Amino acid sequence: MNFNIESIKRKMLIKYPFFGSIVANVNYKENKEIPTAGTDGQTIHYNPDFLKKLNPDEQTFIFAHEVCHIAFDHIRRSEGKDPEVWNIATDGVINQFLKRDGLKIVEGGIDIAEAINYDAEQLYDKLLKEKQQNQNQNGQDNKQNQQGSSSEQRQQGQRQSSSNESQNQNENQSQGQGNPSEKQNHNVGHDIHSMWQDAVKKQKESQSDEKQTEEQKQQEEILQQEIDKISKMEEQSAFNKNLEEKRKELEALKQVLSKQAMGAGTFTNRDQRIINDIGKSKPIIDWRYVLREAIQYDVDWSYKNAYIENGVVIANLEEQPMPETEIVLDTSGSINELLLKNFLRECKNILQHSKVKVGCFDTEFYGFHEIRTEKDIENMKFEGGGGTDFNVAVRAFTRRVENKIIFTDGEAKMPNIPMDAIWIVFGEIKINPKGGKVIQINGKQLDRLYSFEQDIFYKGKSR
Protein backbone atom coordinates (compact mmCIF):
# COMPACT_ATOMS: atom_id res chain seq x y z
CA MET A 1 0.00 0.00 0.00
CA ASN A 2 1.32 3.44 -0.93
CA PHE A 3 1.76 6.04 1.79
CA ASN A 4 1.65 9.82 1.18
CA ILE A 5 1.65 12.12 4.21
CA GLU A 6 0.45 15.14 2.19
CA SER A 7 -2.54 13.18 0.89
CA ILE A 8 -3.45 12.12 4.43
CA LYS A 9 -3.20 15.72 5.66
CA ARG A 10 -5.59 16.82 2.90
CA LYS A 11 -8.07 14.12 3.94
CA MET A 12 -7.89 15.23 7.58
CA LEU A 13 -8.42 18.90 6.63
CA ILE A 14 -11.51 17.92 4.65
CA LYS A 15 -12.97 15.62 7.29
CA TYR A 16 -12.00 17.67 10.35
CA PRO A 17 -12.01 21.42 9.53
CA PHE A 18 -12.47 22.21 13.24
CA PHE A 19 -9.03 20.71 13.90
CA GLY A 20 -7.55 22.29 10.76
CA SER A 21 -4.97 24.52 12.48
CA ILE A 22 -3.65 21.56 14.46
CA VAL A 23 -3.36 19.44 11.30
CA ALA A 24 -1.60 22.28 9.45
CA ASN A 25 0.84 23.38 12.18
CA VAL A 26 1.91 20.15 13.86
CA ASN A 27 5.17 18.57 12.69
CA TYR A 28 5.25 15.15 11.01
CA LYS A 29 8.43 13.08 11.36
CA GLU A 30 9.47 9.65 10.13
CA ASN A 31 10.80 7.51 12.97
CA LYS A 32 11.69 3.88 12.28
CA GLU A 33 12.75 3.37 15.90
CA ILE A 34 9.09 3.13 16.94
CA PRO A 35 6.83 0.29 15.76
CA THR A 36 3.73 2.33 14.86
CA ALA A 37 3.08 6.02 15.64
CA GLY A 38 3.00 8.43 18.57
CA THR A 39 3.24 12.06 19.60
CA ASP A 40 5.12 14.23 22.06
CA GLY A 41 2.53 17.02 21.82
CA GLN A 42 4.39 18.99 19.13
CA THR A 43 5.35 16.35 16.58
CA ILE A 44 3.64 13.26 15.24
CA HIS A 45 6.21 10.48 14.87
CA TYR A 46 5.39 7.62 12.54
CA ASN A 47 7.02 4.52 11.13
CA PRO A 48 6.44 4.58 7.33
CA ASP A 49 6.87 0.80 7.08
CA PHE A 50 3.95 0.35 9.46
CA LEU A 51 1.77 2.84 7.56
CA LYS A 52 2.39 1.09 4.23
CA LYS A 53 0.70 -2.04 5.57
CA LEU A 54 -2.57 -0.16 6.14
CA ASN A 55 -5.29 0.96 3.74
CA PRO A 56 -5.95 4.73 3.22
CA ASP A 57 -8.77 4.92 5.77
CA GLU A 58 -6.64 3.21 8.41
CA GLN A 59 -3.73 5.55 7.62
CA THR A 60 -6.03 8.54 8.09
CA PHE A 61 -7.25 7.03 11.38
CA ILE A 62 -3.67 6.77 12.69
CA PHE A 63 -2.89 10.44 12.10
CA ALA A 64 -6.32 11.73 13.15
CA HIS A 65 -5.88 9.78 16.40
CA GLU A 66 -2.54 11.52 17.11
CA VAL A 67 -3.96 14.93 16.12
CA CYS A 68 -6.71 14.40 18.72
CA HIS A 69 -4.15 13.60 21.45
CA ILE A 70 -2.48 16.92 20.63
CA ALA A 71 -5.68 18.97 20.23
CA PHE A 72 -7.15 17.83 23.55
CA ASP A 73 -3.79 18.22 25.35
CA HIS A 74 -3.97 14.64 26.61
CA ILE A 75 -0.26 14.61 27.47
CA ARG A 76 -0.35 17.57 29.86
CA ARG A 77 -3.64 16.35 31.33
CA SER A 78 -2.00 12.98 32.11
CA GLU A 79 0.01 14.47 34.97
CA GLY A 80 -0.93 12.96 38.32
CA LYS A 81 -3.06 10.21 36.77
CA ASP A 82 -2.62 6.46 36.51
CA PRO A 83 -0.79 6.32 33.14
CA GLU A 84 -2.28 3.06 31.90
CA VAL A 85 -5.86 3.95 32.80
CA TRP A 86 -5.53 7.47 31.33
CA ASN A 87 -4.11 6.11 28.08
CA ILE A 88 -6.94 3.60 27.77
CA ALA A 89 -9.51 6.31 28.53
CA THR A 90 -8.18 8.83 25.98
CA ASP A 91 -7.74 6.20 23.27
CA GLY A 92 -11.16 4.74 24.02
CA VAL A 93 -12.99 8.05 23.65
CA ILE A 94 -11.29 9.46 20.56
CA ASN A 95 -11.34 6.09 18.80
CA GLN A 96 -15.11 5.85 19.13
CA PHE A 97 -15.62 9.35 17.69
CA LEU A 98 -13.26 8.60 14.79
CA LYS A 99 -15.13 5.33 14.26
CA ARG A 100 -18.44 7.22 14.29
CA ASP A 101 -17.04 9.49 11.58
CA GLY A 102 -16.41 6.53 9.31
CA LEU A 103 -12.76 5.74 10.05
CA LYS A 104 -11.74 2.17 10.84
CA ILE A 105 -9.99 1.45 14.13
CA VAL A 106 -6.72 -0.30 13.31
CA GLU A 107 -5.90 -3.71 14.69
CA GLY A 108 -4.79 -3.48 18.32
CA GLY A 109 -6.58 -0.18 18.92
CA ILE A 110 -8.72 0.39 22.02
CA ASP A 111 -12.34 -0.27 21.06
CA ILE A 112 -14.77 0.42 23.94
CA ALA A 113 -18.24 0.92 22.45
CA GLU A 114 -19.67 2.73 25.48
CA ALA A 115 -16.84 5.32 25.36
CA ILE A 116 -18.90 7.30 22.83
CA ASN A 117 -21.01 8.46 25.81
CA TYR A 118 -18.03 9.74 27.83
CA ASP A 119 -15.37 12.41 27.80
CA ALA A 120 -11.81 11.34 28.63
CA GLU A 121 -11.96 12.50 32.28
CA GLN A 122 -15.30 10.76 32.84
CA LEU A 123 -14.15 7.48 31.32
CA TYR A 124 -10.89 7.70 33.28
CA ASP A 125 -12.80 8.03 36.58
CA LYS A 126 -14.98 5.06 35.67
CA LEU A 127 -12.07 2.81 34.62
CA LEU A 128 -9.96 3.81 37.63
CA LYS A 129 -12.81 2.97 40.00
CA GLU A 130 -13.25 -0.42 38.32
CA LYS A 131 -9.51 -1.11 38.56
CA GLN A 132 -9.45 -0.25 42.27
CA GLN A 133 -12.51 -2.42 42.93
CA ASN A 134 -10.88 -5.35 41.14
CA GLN A 135 -7.68 -4.91 43.13
CA ASN A 136 -9.63 -4.79 46.43
CA GLN A 137 -11.66 -7.85 45.47
CA ASN A 138 -8.54 -9.81 44.52
CA GLY A 139 -6.91 -8.81 47.80
CA GLN A 140 -9.89 -10.03 49.82
CA ASP A 141 -10.03 -13.30 47.87
CA ASN A 142 -6.33 -13.93 48.50
CA LYS A 143 -6.70 -13.20 52.21
CA GLN A 144 -9.62 -15.60 52.57
CA ASN A 145 -7.72 -18.30 50.71
CA GLN A 146 -4.70 -17.90 52.98
CA GLN A 147 -6.89 -18.35 56.08
CA GLY A 148 -8.20 -21.76 54.92
CA SER A 149 -7.52 -24.53 57.53
CA SER A 150 -7.20 -27.58 55.33
CA SER A 151 -4.49 -28.21 52.80
CA GLU A 152 -7.20 -28.83 50.20
CA GLN A 153 -8.65 -25.39 50.86
CA ARG A 154 -5.20 -23.84 50.69
CA GLN A 155 -4.48 -25.57 47.38
CA GLN A 156 -7.86 -24.59 45.98
CA GLY A 157 -7.28 -20.98 47.06
CA GLN A 158 -3.89 -20.98 45.40
CA ARG A 159 -5.41 -22.30 42.19
CA GLN A 160 -8.17 -19.65 42.32
CA SER A 161 -5.64 -16.89 43.03
CA SER A 162 -3.49 -18.05 40.14
CA SER A 163 -6.58 -18.16 37.91
CA ASN A 164 -7.58 -14.63 38.95
CA GLU A 165 -4.10 -13.29 38.27
CA SER A 166 -4.02 -14.98 34.89
CA GLN A 167 -7.48 -13.66 34.05
CA ASN A 168 -6.55 -10.12 35.09
CA GLN A 169 -3.36 -10.29 33.05
CA ASN A 170 -5.33 -11.47 29.99
CA GLU A 171 -7.87 -8.70 30.48
CA ASN A 172 -5.08 -6.15 30.67
CA GLN A 173 -3.50 -7.45 27.50
CA SER A 174 -6.82 -7.50 25.65
CA GLN A 175 -7.19 -3.83 26.53
CA GLY A 176 -3.71 -3.11 25.25
CA GLN A 177 -2.13 -2.70 28.68
CA GLY A 178 0.34 -5.56 28.57
CA ASN A 179 2.46 -6.48 31.57
CA PRO A 180 3.43 -3.36 33.60
CA SER A 181 6.66 -5.00 34.75
CA GLU A 182 7.67 -5.42 31.12
CA LYS A 183 6.28 -2.10 29.87
CA GLN A 184 7.43 0.60 32.22
CA ASN A 185 6.31 3.27 29.74
CA HIS A 186 2.66 2.11 29.88
CA ASN A 187 2.05 1.86 26.12
CA VAL A 188 -1.50 0.81 25.27
CA GLY A 189 -3.50 0.35 22.11
CA HIS A 190 -2.04 0.67 18.64
CA ASP A 191 0.19 3.70 19.25
CA ILE A 192 3.18 4.60 21.40
CA HIS A 193 2.59 6.60 24.62
CA SER A 194 6.09 6.11 25.96
CA MET A 195 7.17 9.64 25.03
CA TRP A 196 4.42 11.28 27.09
CA GLN A 197 6.35 11.35 30.37
CA ASP A 198 9.34 13.08 28.76
CA ALA A 199 6.97 15.54 27.10
CA VAL A 200 5.44 16.48 30.46
CA LYS A 201 8.93 17.18 31.85
CA LYS A 202 9.75 19.38 28.86
CA GLN A 203 6.49 21.30 29.28
CA LYS A 204 7.39 21.96 32.92
CA GLU A 205 10.81 23.29 31.93
CA SER A 206 9.07 25.12 29.07
CA GLN A 207 12.05 26.95 27.61
CA SER A 208 11.79 27.61 23.90
CA ASP A 209 14.63 26.31 21.77
CA GLU A 210 16.94 29.20 20.91
CA LYS A 211 17.87 27.48 17.64
CA GLN A 212 14.30 27.78 16.36
CA THR A 213 13.68 30.14 13.45
CA GLU A 214 11.07 32.87 13.76
CA GLU A 215 8.80 30.88 11.44
CA GLN A 216 9.10 27.80 13.66
CA LYS A 217 8.37 29.85 16.78
CA GLN A 218 5.32 31.39 15.13
CA GLN A 219 4.11 27.95 14.04
CA GLU A 220 4.54 26.68 17.61
CA GLU A 221 2.63 29.65 19.02
CA ILE A 222 -0.29 29.10 16.61
CA LEU A 223 -0.34 25.42 17.52
CA GLN A 224 -0.39 26.18 21.24
CA GLN A 225 -3.19 28.73 20.83
CA GLU A 226 -5.32 26.12 19.05
CA ILE A 227 -4.53 23.50 21.71
CA ASP A 228 -5.53 25.96 24.46
CA LYS A 229 -8.83 26.66 22.65
CA ILE A 230 -9.83 23.08 21.84
CA SER A 231 -8.58 21.46 25.06
CA LYS A 232 -11.04 23.59 27.04
CA MET A 233 -13.85 21.74 25.27
CA GLU A 234 -14.98 18.22 26.06
CA GLU A 235 -14.22 15.62 23.38
CA GLN A 236 -17.92 15.14 22.63
CA SER A 237 -18.46 18.88 22.20
CA ALA A 238 -15.48 19.32 19.88
CA PHE A 239 -16.40 16.45 17.56
CA ASN A 240 -20.02 17.61 17.40
CA LYS A 241 -18.82 21.17 16.73
CA ASN A 242 -16.86 19.86 13.75
CA LEU A 243 -19.98 18.17 12.35
CA GLU A 244 -22.10 21.23 13.04
CA GLU A 245 -19.77 23.49 11.07
CA LYS A 246 -19.88 21.12 8.10
CA ARG A 247 -23.67 20.93 8.31
CA LYS A 248 -24.09 24.74 8.42
CA GLU A 249 -21.88 25.16 5.37
CA LEU A 250 -23.87 22.53 3.50
CA GLU A 251 -27.18 24.21 4.38
CA ALA A 252 -25.85 27.61 3.30
CA LEU A 253 -24.75 26.19 -0.05
CA LYS A 254 -28.14 24.56 -0.56
CA GLN A 255 -29.87 27.90 0.10
CA VAL A 256 -27.65 29.62 -2.46
CA LEU A 257 -28.47 26.97 -5.05
CA SER A 258 -32.19 27.33 -4.43
CA LYS A 259 -32.20 31.14 -4.77
CA GLN A 260 -29.66 32.14 -7.45
CA ALA A 261 -30.91 35.68 -7.56
CA MET A 262 -29.48 37.99 -10.22
CA GLY A 263 -29.55 36.07 -13.48
CA ALA A 264 -27.86 36.81 -16.79
CA GLY A 265 -27.11 40.24 -18.24
CA THR A 266 -25.13 41.96 -20.98
CA PHE A 267 -22.86 44.20 -18.93
CA THR A 268 -19.53 43.68 -17.20
CA ASN A 269 -18.52 45.20 -13.88
CA ARG A 270 -14.85 44.20 -13.83
CA ASP A 271 -15.14 44.00 -10.06
CA GLN A 272 -12.20 42.33 -8.35
CA ARG A 273 -12.79 39.98 -5.46
CA ILE A 274 -10.34 38.25 -3.16
CA ILE A 275 -11.75 35.09 -1.60
CA ASN A 276 -10.28 34.28 1.81
CA ASP A 277 -10.35 30.95 3.63
CA ILE A 278 -11.36 28.90 0.60
CA GLY A 279 -10.73 25.69 2.51
CA LYS A 280 -11.09 22.14 1.22
CA SER A 281 -13.90 19.68 0.69
CA LYS A 282 -14.29 16.09 -0.35
CA PRO A 283 -14.66 15.89 -4.14
CA ILE A 284 -18.27 16.23 -5.27
CA ILE A 285 -17.20 14.47 -8.46
CA ASP A 286 -14.73 11.61 -8.91
CA TRP A 287 -12.37 13.50 -11.17
CA ARG A 288 -10.26 10.42 -11.93
CA TYR A 289 -13.04 9.14 -14.18
CA VAL A 290 -14.19 12.49 -15.54
CA LEU A 291 -10.82 13.78 -16.68
CA ARG A 292 -9.47 12.16 -19.82
CA GLU A 293 -6.16 10.37 -19.51
CA ALA A 294 -6.04 11.49 -15.88
CA ILE A 295 -3.01 10.11 -14.03
CA GLN A 296 -1.44 10.81 -10.64
CA TYR A 297 2.16 10.57 -11.77
CA ASP A 298 4.25 12.28 -14.42
CA VAL A 299 6.83 9.62 -15.31
CA ASP A 300 6.38 6.37 -17.21
CA TRP A 301 8.37 3.72 -19.01
CA SER A 302 9.09 4.62 -22.63
CA TYR A 303 10.75 2.60 -25.40
CA LYS A 304 11.96 5.73 -27.17
CA ASN A 305 15.77 5.55 -27.36
CA ALA A 306 15.65 2.07 -25.79
CA TYR A 307 18.74 -0.13 -25.90
CA ILE A 308 19.55 -3.84 -25.88
CA GLU A 309 21.48 -5.38 -23.00
CA ASN A 310 22.23 -9.14 -22.89
CA GLY A 311 19.56 -9.72 -25.52
CA VAL A 312 16.86 -7.83 -23.53
CA VAL A 313 15.26 -4.55 -24.66
CA ILE A 314 15.72 -2.01 -21.84
CA ALA A 315 13.26 0.88 -21.69
CA ASN A 316 14.15 4.38 -20.50
CA LEU A 317 12.30 6.03 -17.66
CA GLU A 318 11.16 9.30 -19.20
CA GLU A 319 8.84 12.07 -18.17
CA GLN A 320 5.40 11.82 -19.72
CA PRO A 321 3.15 14.87 -19.80
CA MET A 322 0.31 14.99 -17.30
CA PRO A 323 -3.11 15.76 -18.76
CA GLU A 324 -3.92 19.45 -18.99
CA THR A 325 -7.16 20.99 -17.85
CA GLU A 326 -8.48 24.48 -18.53
CA ILE A 327 -11.19 25.72 -16.19
CA VAL A 328 -13.35 28.80 -16.70
CA LEU A 329 -15.24 30.06 -13.66
CA ASP A 330 -18.51 31.93 -13.93
CA THR A 331 -17.90 35.06 -11.83
CA SER A 332 -21.05 36.90 -12.94
CA GLY A 333 -23.35 38.73 -10.54
CA SER A 334 -25.37 35.61 -9.73
CA ILE A 335 -22.31 33.87 -8.25
CA ASN A 336 -21.84 34.77 -4.60
CA GLU A 337 -18.76 34.11 -2.46
CA LEU A 338 -19.96 30.77 -1.06
CA LEU A 339 -20.69 29.37 -4.52
CA LEU A 340 -17.34 30.59 -5.83
CA LYS A 341 -15.58 28.93 -2.88
CA ASN A 342 -17.14 25.62 -3.85
CA PHE A 343 -15.98 26.09 -7.45
CA LEU A 344 -12.45 26.67 -6.15
CA ARG A 345 -12.46 23.69 -3.79
CA GLU A 346 -13.23 21.46 -6.75
CA CYS A 347 -10.36 23.14 -8.63
CA LYS A 348 -8.08 22.01 -5.79
CA ASN A 349 -9.37 18.46 -6.17
CA ILE A 350 -8.78 18.55 -9.94
CA LEU A 351 -5.22 19.72 -9.30
CA GLN A 352 -4.45 16.31 -7.78
CA HIS A 353 -5.00 14.65 -11.17
CA SER A 354 -4.01 17.19 -13.82
CA LYS A 355 -2.12 20.31 -14.75
CA VAL A 356 -4.53 23.21 -14.35
CA LYS A 357 -5.18 26.69 -15.72
CA VAL A 358 -8.05 28.76 -14.32
CA GLY A 359 -9.74 31.86 -15.74
CA CYS A 360 -12.82 33.95 -14.91
CA PHE A 361 -15.62 35.28 -17.12
CA ASP A 362 -18.88 37.20 -17.05
CA THR A 363 -19.52 38.94 -20.40
CA GLU A 364 -15.75 39.12 -20.83
CA PHE A 365 -12.96 36.59 -20.33
CA TYR A 366 -10.20 37.80 -18.01
CA GLY A 367 -7.38 35.42 -18.98
CA PHE A 368 -5.98 32.14 -17.66
CA HIS A 369 -3.77 31.76 -14.57
CA GLU A 370 -1.45 28.77 -14.38
CA ILE A 371 -2.09 26.83 -11.18
CA ARG A 372 0.81 24.80 -9.83
CA THR A 373 -0.14 24.56 -6.15
CA GLU A 374 -3.18 25.13 -3.96
CA LYS A 375 -1.61 28.41 -2.82
CA ASP A 376 -1.94 29.70 -6.40
CA ILE A 377 -5.70 29.21 -6.07
CA GLU A 378 -5.75 30.91 -2.66
CA ASN A 379 -3.91 33.93 -4.08
CA MET A 380 -6.06 34.43 -7.18
CA LYS A 381 -8.04 37.61 -7.81
CA PHE A 382 -11.46 37.09 -9.35
CA GLU A 383 -12.81 39.58 -11.85
CA GLY A 384 -16.43 39.80 -12.93
CA GLY A 385 -19.68 40.72 -11.27
CA GLY A 386 -21.69 41.50 -14.43
CA GLY A 387 -23.89 39.41 -16.71
CA THR A 388 -23.13 36.01 -18.22
CA ASP A 389 -22.10 35.21 -21.80
CA PHE A 390 -21.32 31.55 -22.42
CA ASN A 391 -20.05 32.28 -25.95
CA VAL A 392 -17.21 34.18 -24.25
CA ALA A 393 -16.55 31.17 -22.01
CA VAL A 394 -16.28 28.54 -24.76
CA ARG A 395 -14.11 30.78 -26.96
CA ALA A 396 -11.60 31.09 -24.11
CA PHE A 397 -10.46 27.45 -24.35
CA THR A 398 -7.28 26.38 -26.12
CA ARG A 399 -8.05 24.00 -28.98
CA ARG A 400 -5.80 21.09 -28.07
CA VAL A 401 -6.21 21.00 -24.29
CA GLU A 402 -7.44 17.57 -23.10
CA ASN A 403 -10.03 18.77 -20.57
CA LYS A 404 -12.27 21.83 -20.74
CA ILE A 405 -14.42 22.57 -17.68
CA ILE A 406 -16.98 25.32 -17.05
CA PHE A 407 -18.19 25.97 -13.49
CA THR A 408 -21.47 27.91 -13.48
CA ASP A 409 -24.97 28.23 -12.07
CA GLY A 410 -26.36 27.95 -15.62
CA GLU A 411 -28.11 31.33 -15.66
CA ALA A 412 -27.70 32.40 -19.29
CA LYS A 413 -28.47 31.33 -22.86
CA MET A 414 -26.45 28.44 -24.17
CA PRO A 415 -23.63 29.29 -26.60
CA ASN A 416 -24.08 28.99 -30.36
CA ILE A 417 -20.66 27.36 -30.63
CA PRO A 418 -20.45 23.56 -30.23
CA MET A 419 -17.91 22.69 -27.56
CA ASP A 420 -16.77 19.37 -26.12
CA ALA A 421 -16.59 20.68 -22.56
CA ILE A 422 -17.66 19.47 -19.12
CA TRP A 423 -20.33 21.75 -17.67
CA ILE A 424 -20.51 21.64 -13.86
CA VAL A 425 -23.82 23.30 -12.99
CA PHE A 426 -24.51 24.18 -9.35
CA GLY A 427 -28.25 24.56 -8.83
CA GLU A 428 -31.59 23.50 -10.29
CA ILE A 429 -31.31 25.15 -13.74
CA LYS A 430 -31.25 22.57 -16.52
CA ILE A 431 -29.01 23.35 -19.49
CA ASN A 432 -28.60 21.71 -22.89
CA PRO A 433 -25.38 22.91 -24.57
CA LYS A 434 -24.27 21.91 -28.06
CA GLY A 435 -21.84 19.13 -27.28
CA GLY A 436 -20.03 18.19 -24.11
CA LYS A 437 -21.24 16.70 -20.84
CA VAL A 438 -23.41 18.27 -18.13
CA ILE A 439 -22.98 17.33 -14.44
CA GLN A 440 -25.71 18.79 -12.25
CA ILE A 441 -24.99 19.57 -8.59
CA ASN A 442 -28.19 20.31 -6.68
CA GLY A 443 -29.42 20.15 -3.10
CA LYS A 444 -30.54 16.51 -3.30
CA GLN A 445 -27.14 15.39 -4.55
CA LEU A 446 -25.38 17.34 -1.80
CA ASP A 447 -27.67 15.67 0.75
CA ARG A 448 -26.70 12.23 -0.56
CA LEU A 449 -23.02 13.18 -0.61
CA TYR A 450 -23.01 14.36 3.01
CA SER A 451 -25.81 12.17 4.39
CA PHE A 452 -23.42 10.18 6.59
CA GLU A 453 -22.04 13.30 8.31
CA GLN A 454 -25.55 14.70 8.77
CA ASP A 455 -26.86 11.46 10.27
CA ILE A 456 -24.12 11.24 12.87
CA PHE A 457 -24.49 14.94 13.71
CA TYR A 458 -28.18 14.59 14.47
CA LYS A 459 -27.57 11.38 16.44
CA GLY A 460 -24.96 13.27 18.47
CA LYS A 461 -27.43 16.08 19.20
CA SER A 462 -30.08 13.65 20.39
CA ARG A 463 -27.89 11.96 22.99
Image (cartoon, grey):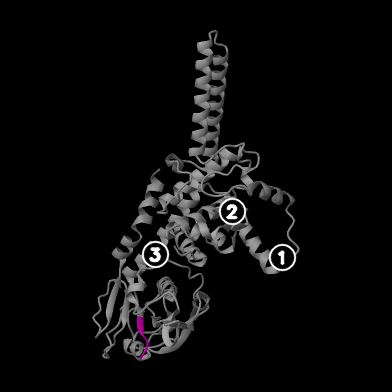
Select label 1 or label 2 by which is in front.
2
- For the C terminus, give its image quadrant: top left
- Residue 188: say if magenta: no
Residue denoted by label 1: 212
Amino acid residing under circle 3: Ala
CB contact under 8 Å: marks 1 and 2: no
Residue denoted by label 2: 34
Query: What's drawn in magenta, residue-wise?
Result: 400-405
Q: Earlier in the sequence, mark 1 or mark 2?
A: 2
Residue denoted by label 3: 252
Which residue ends up furthest to the top in the rendered image? 149
Q: Residues within 10 Å of mark 3 (few under 14, many from 20)?
A: few
Say which residue appears at 56% left-offset and 59% top-offset: 22
Position of residue 233 relative to residue 48, above or below, is above
Which percent across, then down, holds residue 434? Answer: 24, 86
Amino acid residing under circle 1: Gln
Select label 1 or label 3 by which is in front.
1
In the picture, measured across the screen, residue 404 lies left or right of residue 305, that is left
Which percent across, then down, holds residue 136? Answer: 56, 23
Amino acid residing under circle 2: Ile
